[in-house]
Amino acid sequence: MRSSPVFVRPPCPGCDQGQDGAHRGASFHVKHAVGSTGYEALLIGGRSGVGKSTVAWEVSAQLQDGAQLLDGPVAHCLIEGDFLDQAYPPPEGDPTRRKLTEDNLTALWRNFAALGYRRLIYTNTVSILESDLIVRAMGGNPRITAVLLTSTDETASARLSAREIGSQFDAHVHRSSAMARWLDKGAPLSVVRVPTDGRDVISIARDVVAATRWAGSPLS
């Protein structure tokens, strides 16, 4: 389900950004701030091959497309958590690289927040189990929406076979199956589960956008 990411910040002709982070313009309006200081985060988790990255980029596209949302475009940033700990060997004293992930996320979010962004889309396999890490990295008391994408072993394996062309395919398949069971068992009741089997990316992303309540209900 992986596709080439394209992140387009919507144009804002005649826009005047106020201190509260909201963009205002006669011909265009971007829903930017939750409040004067409020933060929100959408956590997208799931096994390898379930389509986290692809769904996240489609969620971003739908939030940018004001024509498809009752409240118009929604300002946000997107961070792929799987890239935040890509270092070998692990830092001393941080064998799981969890601290490295948190430090990098903190630094990135600080930059986005300084520019007025208040909403974060964050993808990571176990993100739905690590809301405490997200809260510390963002600061304050962000409202968290956690979504677990699910699929069968067969679906995940088929997607991985199209993506993994190197030496790690078998390892990814094995870890994906084990992780699916762990996530299913450990996900809190507050986590929204979104099945992906036999569905197109657009419809999956619509379910995820609806779970955030960031922009009203998608227009049909």
Image: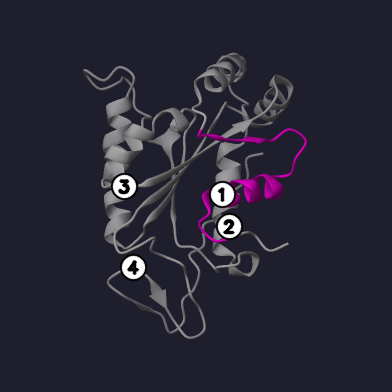
Q: Are marks 1 and 2 in contact (CB under 8 Å)?
A: yes
Determine whether 40 is above or below 167 in the image.
Answer: below
Provide the secondary structure element on which disc 4 rests: loop
Residue where numbered disc 3 is placed? 108
Disc on res. 21? 4
Give how far across and how far down residue 40 sits, in percent: 40, 50
Q: From the viewer's perspective, tell me whether residue 149 is left or right of residue 189.
A: right
Q: Residue furthest front?
A: 189
Q: Along the polypeptide, which appears first: circle 3 or circle 1? A: 1
Q: Which span is picked out in magenta? A: 190-216
The span from disc 1 to disc 2 (Cα, nearest Å) is 6 Å
Provide the secondary structure element on which disc 1 rests: helix
Q: Along the polypeptide, which appears first: circle 4 or circle 2? A: 4
The span from disc 2 to disc 3 (Cα, nearest Å) is 21 Å
- In the rendered image, residue 54 lying in the magenta stretch gets the answer no
Question: What's under tag 3, amino acid-wise?
Answer: Leu
Question: What's under tag 1, amino acid-wise?
Answer: Trp
Residue where numbered disc 2 is placed? 61
Q: From the viewer's perspective, tell me whether residue 56 is left or right of residue 88.
A: right
Question: How would you rate the neighbour count of disc 4 (Cα within 10 Å): few for under 14, some for 14-19, many for 20 or more?
Answer: many
Question: What's under tag 2, amino acid-wise?
Answer: Ala
The span from disc 3 to disc 1 (Cα, nearest Å) is 18 Å
Q: How many marks?
A: 4
Residue found 78% across the figure and 36% down from its top: 198
